[in-house]
Amino acid sequence: YYDPLTVLSLMYGDGPAARDNISVSDSEEKRDSIGVKRLSDARDEYTQIKPYAGMPKEVLVLYSSKARYRVPREILFWLTVCCTLALVAVTIAVIALSPKCLSWWQASPVYQIYPRSFKDSDGDGVGDLKGIKEKLDHFEYLNIKSIWISPFYRSPMKDFGYDVEDFRDIDPLFGTMKDFEELLATMHSKGLRLIMDFIPNHTSDRHRWFNLSRTRDPHYEDYYVWTDCKPDGPKPNNWVSIFGNSSWTYDEVRGQCYLHQFLKEQPDLNFRNPDVINEMIDIIHFWLDKGVDGFRMDAVKHMLEAPHMRDEPQVDPNKPPELVTTEWDLHSDYTTSQVGLHDILREFRAQMDIYSQEPGRYRFMVIESYDYEEVYKTMMYYGTKLEKEGDFPFNFYLLDLPQNTSGAWAKHLVHLWMGNMPKGKWPNWVVGNHDRTRISSSAGQLYVRAINMLLLTLPGTATTYYGEEIGMENINVTANPQRSPLQWNANMNAGFNDKTNLTWLPLHPDYETVNVEAQMKDDGSVLAQYRFLNTLRQSELPLNRGWFCYVHTDANVFSYIRELDGLKRAFLIVVNFGKESVVTDLSSVRELPDELKVLMSTNKVNDGKVFPKSRIQTEVGEGLVIQYSTNTRFNPNHPEECYISEKACYLETIGILYKCQ
Ligand code: NOJ
């Protein structure tokens, strides 16, 4: 804070000498008549000078200390402080009150690419990584962001890539590491995420570790599960492979039997050896360092076996032991889901979490485990509140829909998951993959659209096996009927390979009509409906994160509501999985308006139709999405019929979501 007079003296005075004069008292001033004169002159000028642009600091200071400038400045200062504090408080409140945003693996379906069959870029008849890169626009069209690519590691292909010879290399059939890196970079530039298969349970028998293990290299000796047996003698125990027959094979080099829960060319790794765990963690790092967004963890329940190696109990104790040859003959008590398995998976998860700290780079982990009726075993892969594991284990129950296609069965299968999933977890749905008959073949074409509607309107992440978006069917061959080339168009090889006449499996003969190009032109096609539903789902809060409530089930129809507290717009889904056309009466559901307008029907002619809620008509295999407006939510009145992963409410006045109880 400068005394104005001091400032003036600095301006008009003679440097330090003048400054000294100014700082003395009045009586001293009088002693210097020249100085006194100068000061009075300056005072006069001071009252005359106006602030001007480019004024020196001293003049500025002079004026700024005057009350008329200082007071507004101080008011402004305190206003700024208050506003900043208020903004910080509002920001903290908004963060605290906002529900978590959906992560990428929740917001989009996961699309499974079987790389052999997606697109062949080099004309050898087998799909490849460059082919996938050429076709990324397909995902932009479908509004799909998460792509899982089945194995493309170097492999002798005894189990089509699930027998890995080198976890750090690409099989030449699919391309090179450079092709992979380019694919990943292109995917990321388009906002797509890449999920890889990770296969911890076994390697190929051509893997370097197995060769070192069978020759008893001291470091690798215990990398696999070995036990004594004779070349032609009895097997060490009654354990059977998933592919049938004993899971033990004698190895002449080592003179012992090794365990393989799948093919004999897929020896099981020994996860009781910490070195094996560390090797696998290094491989996880290798791919995460490359930028991979997630892993689908293959066959994890088989990773540990009981060290005592006792015979497993037979399902039918009276069956002669020599007829015990399939996994269905035994209770797999000693070869699956052993104590310690979840600790290993959590360790894997922890690695992914380290990489997930990078903003916007959450690394996703999905578990593959078929536990059939032991659903509680599957649910354990979700982990606990304190110990995270998979983001979700694959839900394969809908694969059984064709066993008894009906409304009641659909509800039963859906409820197997919803009724057993730990609170707050995120559901998911699979209706096809490379191991199972295509749902369009097992359930029949009639239900394909309805099944896609179910998949995309249930809560949670949908998984779509390539070709399901156009309703592709199995081909008529004994092995791999569900892995035929994707039908892109009606041209040579359905556009899968446009260079030579080779395709590793025959095409389905229906490709001339059932193909992507033709369906893109038809707004009533399976593809167009898939795209519509997926886009609707991603743009509508009730569908992507709202309540899911059962409304009605009978032999034909399965019906549910998707709604969000605070939002007037809600959706009623009515799907006829039965064998007859029916009229469904929902007049007892008082939360529904009396008239219901169809937003979308799988039977296009019914789009826009209006039904009284007492008479909702559906044909066999028809699904309806009905959008309605309401002030009365269904879930508060029927809590036992409703599920939500993370509760959120909508504040319609300002259009935001907030956490609510
Ligand atoms: C599950 C895969 O989906 C299947 O194709 C494979 O044969 C086994 N795991 C073994 O890796």
Image (cartoon, rainbow, N blue to C red):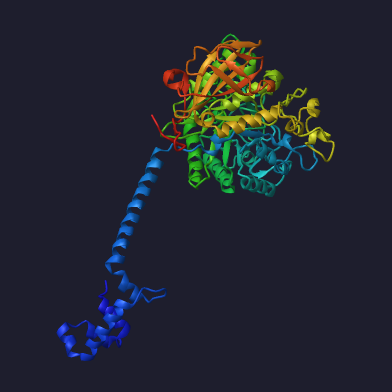
Residue 49 in sight: yes
Report the label total: 0
Give x and y (percent) for residue 88: 37, 48
Q: Kindly indicate the quadrant of the structure image that contains residue 397.
A: top right
Does 485 sit left or right of 12 as displayed? right
The residue nearer to you, when weighing 522 against 170, is 522
The residue nearer to you, when weighing 316 against 631, is 631
Give x and y (percent) for residue 586: 53, 13
Q: Split into 4 quadrants, where in the image is the N terminus? A: bottom left
Residue 439 in sight: no
Judge whether 2 appears above or below 89 on screen: below
Give x and y (percent) for residue 561: 52, 22
User: Which residue of the protein is positioned furthest toward the top in this rendering?
Assistant: 318
Does 381 sit left or right of 32 as displayed? right
User: Which residue of the protein is positioned furthest toward the left in this rendering?
Assistant: 27
The residue nearer to you, when weighing 630 against 98, is 630
Give x and y (percent) for residue 321: 61, 14
Judge whether 184 appears above or below 456 on screen: below
Does 196 sit left or right of 422 as displayed? right
Q: Split into 4 quadrants, where in the image is the C terminus? A: top left
Judge whether 439 appears above or below 27 on screen: above
Q: Residue at coordinates 23% horizontally, 83% vertically from top-left?
A: 22
Q: Kindly indicate the quadrant of the structure image that contains residue 254.
A: top right
The residue nearer to you, when weighing 630 against 297, is 630
